[in-house]
Image (tube, grey):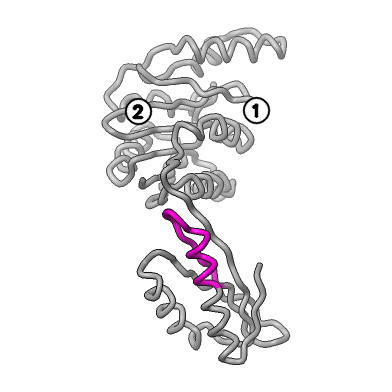
């Protein structure tokens, strides 16, 4: 299935915060059997968040967002998400219980701002957040799956982990490995990369990453990835062929 990652937050676009959340979500989605086809980042502006959800859903079967689930005025992801899907925003009893339990454990009172974190699109399922107060949101609508997570990295990871069984594609396996080739320029080895990909009839994808020049001269990392019924076998076969060709050109290689 195809997936999209939507990041919400002014701090990302201003460059104040590095978007490590999108990288983590992308890796989890990839290793869960999905192809990430789109990544979007929008400001904490209602119209832009609505646009982000609608646009992402045009390209993907699964949309995972991060950011904007807190109690402050600029946390408006829940209401914007509901608007994007044309659903009413309602208080979710499951989410409210999660929030109350979290606040009680910390000796805090329920306030209107904190109650806001229990507001979700009608029909949504609350996802437990073991690292914070705001629950995540899971919803299936229009043949799409949506997972809305907080922006705090630890909280995002907690919600994503607790929802993985809802979004993982267990029918698809994914594998990737890399080998480091030394002593051969990337441009010289590029034709071999193309040939090996053709040998495997599209079952593997090979990405070359040039590295800083080492003691043996040029260095390139060859990352091989595959998905399907036997991705591990395809990856290993492609790596061996790449390494054989590198050795025939006088290069050295080592798995990384």
Residue 147 position in % (x across, y down): 44, 32
Which residue in the structure is indicated by mark 1? 131
Up/down of 85 relative to 181, above or below: above
| Residue located 41% across and 47% down the image | 40
As rendered, which of 192 and 37 lies closer to the eye? 192
Mark 1 and mark 2 residues within 8 Å of each other at the beta carbon: no
| Residue located 39% across and 75% down the image | 199
Left or right of residue 105, residue 33 in this image: left
Image disc number at residue 82: none
Which residue in the structure is indicated by mark 2? 140
Give the quarter of the image for residue 107: top right
Q: Secondary structure at mark 2?
A: strand
Left or right of residue 238, residue 47 in this image: left
Residue 93 position in % (x across, y down): 47, 9
Residue 70 visible within the image: yes
Up/down of 51 relative to 187, above or below: above
Left or right of residue 52, residue 128 in this image: right
* Magenta run includes residue 148: no
In the picture, the quarter occupied by the C terminus is bottom right
């Amino acid at each position: 299935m195809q997936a999209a990652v939507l990041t919400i937050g002014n701090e990302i676009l201003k460059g104040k915060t590095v978007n490590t959340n999108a990288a983590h979500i992308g890796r989890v989605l990839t290793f869960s059997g999905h192809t990430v086809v789109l990544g979007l980042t929008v400001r904490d502006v209602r119209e832009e968040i609505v646009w982000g959800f609608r646009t992402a859903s045009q390209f993907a079967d699964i949309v995972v967002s991060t950011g904007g689930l807190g109690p402050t005025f600029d946390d408006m992801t829940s209401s914007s998400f509901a608007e994007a899907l044309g659903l009413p925003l309602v208080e979710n009893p499951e989410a409210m219980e999660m929030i109350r339990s979290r606040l009680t454990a910390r000796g805090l009172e329920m306030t209107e701002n904190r109650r806001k974190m229990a507001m979700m699109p009608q029909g949504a399922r609350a996802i437990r957040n073991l690292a914070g107060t705001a629950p995540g949101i899971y919803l299936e609508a229009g043949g799409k799956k949506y997972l809305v997570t907080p922006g705090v990295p630890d909280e995002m990871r907690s919600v994503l982990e607790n929802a993985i069984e809802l979004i993982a594609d267990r029918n698809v396996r994914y594998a990737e490995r890399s080998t480091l080739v030394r002593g051969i320029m990337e441009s010289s080895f590029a034709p071999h990369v193309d040939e090996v990909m053709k040998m495997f009839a599209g079952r593997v994808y090979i990405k070359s990453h040039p590295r800083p020049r080492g003691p043996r001269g040029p260095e390139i990392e060859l990352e091989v990835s595959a998905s399907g019924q036997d991705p591990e076998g395809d990856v290993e076969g492609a790596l061996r062929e790449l390494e054989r060709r590198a050795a025939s050109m006088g290069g050295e290689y080592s798995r990384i």
